Image: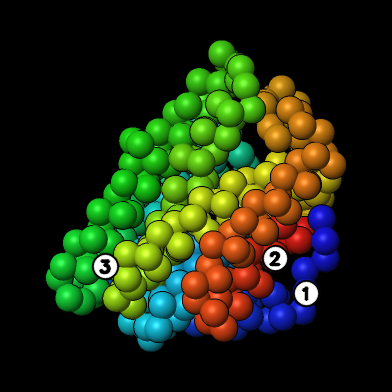
Amino acid sequence: MPQASQSNMTGLSSLREEIEGALETSLGRLSSETPQRLQDAMAYSLMAGGKRLRPALVLMACEACGGQRADALSAACAMEMVHTYSLIHDDLPAMDDDDLRRGVPTCHKKFDEATAILAGDALLTLAFEIIASDVQPTSVALDCCLDLARAAGPEGMVGGQMADLQAETAGVNSLEQLEAIHRRKTGRLIRASLTLGGRIAGASPAEITALSVYGNAVGLAFQIADDLLDVEGSVDKMGKAVQKDASHQKSTYPSWMGVEASRQRAEQLVDDACRAIAIFEERRLPLEELARFIIARDH
């Protein structure tokens, strides 16, 4: 993969600091009615670091459409909560059975399986509470809740995860089938990150369409980059086990296309994504840089 530029890293790092602070504030809204162990497990996973890619996309999309970043911070936090819930559940023994996430023990290893399941459930539901409470006007909050629910639910991320689990035993019959799985499992939440930011900024239908096309392309490029990192990455940089896909004989882009063709496909998708957001002129640049970073990252 090409090397990530300094501007890619600096821009994302700056947003990450802002997002981290907002996430801490969001957790602070939990009352004493929430059992302390549940609060600890939620905070443990949510504040464990990571790229914060999805909430960054919410903020960048809002600004690309002429909105104020501060107005989208709550939605950005909600998006990261949904993503974190999915990671907690994916790591469970019944799913991917992972011991490490972001360089630290997974939630069920740090606490226990029941607490991890409940922490994931709590983050998912808190995400919708935050959008419903904080996003204004109410009609925009409703649209954001719908976008997020559809992206995370049975026709989106959860459905994609189910199809992925089935494919581990039944196999994948075509590259098109593999792509369909990952457009749901990974891509839908990334696309929703873009549309949430756009809706909060009052984006036009044409702008929402442009963000959706960008999100579809970037989401698939992100998954291909992940597949390549599983082949070429290191545990130290990834913060989790690598080469698990091959050991489980799992269908991936490199297993279907080879490493070099997969890399070229990811680069083509990023080019497609960048063309889609030309409508935003100069305001497109942060999104364009982030798309390039997605396939240049080493973790």
Q: How is the image coloured?
A: rainbow
Front one among 278 and 19: 278
Is 187 placed above or below 22 here? above
Quick one: SS at disc 1? loop
Q: Is residue 121 above or below residue 23?
A: above
Q: Contact (CB < 8 A) between labels 2 and 1? A: yes
Question: Can residue 47 be seen here?
Answer: no
The disc at residue 293 is 2
The one nearer the camera, 280 or 28, is 280
Q: Quadrant of residue 254?
A: top right
Does dot 2 land on a helix, a strand or a loop? Answer: helix
User: Which amino acid is tagged 2?
Assistant: Phe
What is the three-letter code of the residue carrying label 1? Ser
Q: Position of residue 153 (x, y in %)?
A: 33, 41
Q: Looking at the figure, which quarter contains the N terminus?
A: bottom right
Which of the two labelled residues, at mark 2 and mark 1, occupies the earlier sequence position?
1
- Residue topped by disc 1: 5
Which of pointers 3 and 2 indicates the residue nearer the eye?
Answer: 2
Which circle, 1 or 3, is nearer the viewer?
1
